[in-house]
Structures are given as C-alpha cells and as structure tokens.
Amino acid sequence: MATHPSAVLDLAGASQANVTFITGLGHRIYSDDIVRALEIAFGDGADSMTNQADTKRVEQFMTTTLDFRVNSLGGALIWDTLQYLAAPLLSAALDQLFHILEPGSSMLAYFHDDERASSVPLYSYRIIDQKTVEVSPKGKTRPAQYFNNRAIEKLFQRFHSVKFFLIRDHLREVIVRR
C-alpha cells in the first residue's frame, strides 16, 4: 500500500473489517465483489469461461470493475480473483491494473497451490490487523487456470517486483510492486 493517504481497491466485496482497517490507515477504499461481477458479466454456467473472450462482455466488465483514472490507486487487494479470469480477460485486467496503480504502489494477490484440483475453495477475506487476514471458505469454484511460481512471475513481468510467501489453506501470497 502507499505510505501517503490514497485510494485502495478491494476486490473481495465490501467488508466492514476491511473498510475499517483501510480507512483507519487514512486511505479511501473502493470495494467490488469481482466474483459476483464475473457472474453478472459472463454467466455462471459452463459457458462462463468461453464468454470471457467476448470483447463486448470484457469491455462491460472492465467498465464496471476497473474503471479508474491512470495512477489513481495507491494499492489493490486482489486476493485470489486473478485465477478466475480466462486469458483474454486476465490480460486486459492486468493491463488496466498496471495503469490505474500509482508507480511504487502494491498489490496483494493469493494463488491456490494445488494444480491438480478440479475445484478450489472460494474465500472471503477479512483484514484483522497488520499481520492477520481471516480467510473463510464460502463454497467451491473452478478456476480458469492455475499458476505456478514461474507463471506468476511472467504474469507480473511489467511490474517492478514480485515476492512470494507460503501461507495456510494451500494459498501462496504474492506482493506485487508497481
């Protein structure tokens, strides 16, 4: 996150704990439930991944979720949402994140580490304090793709740095610096 007061994007949906924590640090917060936005834009059935290649749907999704001015965000809480984006949408979302984040700002992302699983837990994330995030399962879903460490590094190759941390619940925590 930025060290000066700025705007932070939280893609896990509105959570009082996250709002309280971020605003307590002096930042503004924008919350969006990206999993729900994906369902609205692309459907939740078998065609949802295929629909993510539809240019019009991608534009609509980008307008409703990531429509911010260039360099207007001091940080982003991405959580595990990138795994649910098929390649065309993932590329567009990462390009937009690169543009809307201020240089030097950070993103927090999680990636499931079980590459053999046909479905992964869908989590809600609540920031408890500076060292603790509460991770609560809220169902299962099929990811669009899995990422090993090399794929994650390639995913964020335009960004300044990528740091990996292993955490519980079969997740990898990744801090990405713009």
Image (spheres, grey):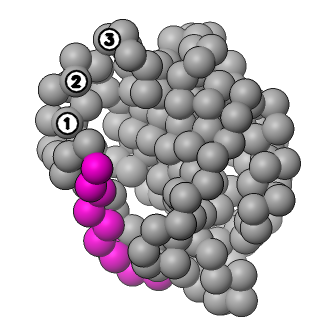
Residue 15 placement (x, y as % from top left)? 22, 47
Dots 2, 1 in contact, CB < 8 A: yes
Q: Between residue 156 and residue 55, name the one nearer to us.
A: 156
Q: Between residue 104 and residue 8, name the one nearer to us.
A: 104
Residue 88 placement, left or right of 84: right
In the image, residue 8 above or below residue 34 = above
> Badge 3: how crowded within 10 Å, few (<14), some, or many (20+)?
some
Q: Between residue 7 and residue 59, name the one nearer to us.
A: 7
The residue carrying mark 1 is 21
The residue carrying mark 3 is 5
Please tell me which residue is depicted at 59% across the width and 18% down the height of the picture.
104
> Badge 2: how crowded within 10 Å, few (<14), some, or many (20+)?
few
> Is residue 136 found inside the magenta-colored segment of the image?
yes
> Badge 1: how crowded within 10 Å, few (<14), some, or many (20+)?
some
Please tell me which residue is depicted at 34% across the width and 48% down the height of the picture.
13
The amino acid sitting under disc 2 is Leu
Residue 72 placement, left or right of 100: left
Q: Earlier in the sequence, mark 2 or mark 3?
A: 3
The amino acid sitting under disc 3 is Pro
Residue 85 quadrant: bottom right
The residue carrying mark 2 is 25
Magenta range is 131-140
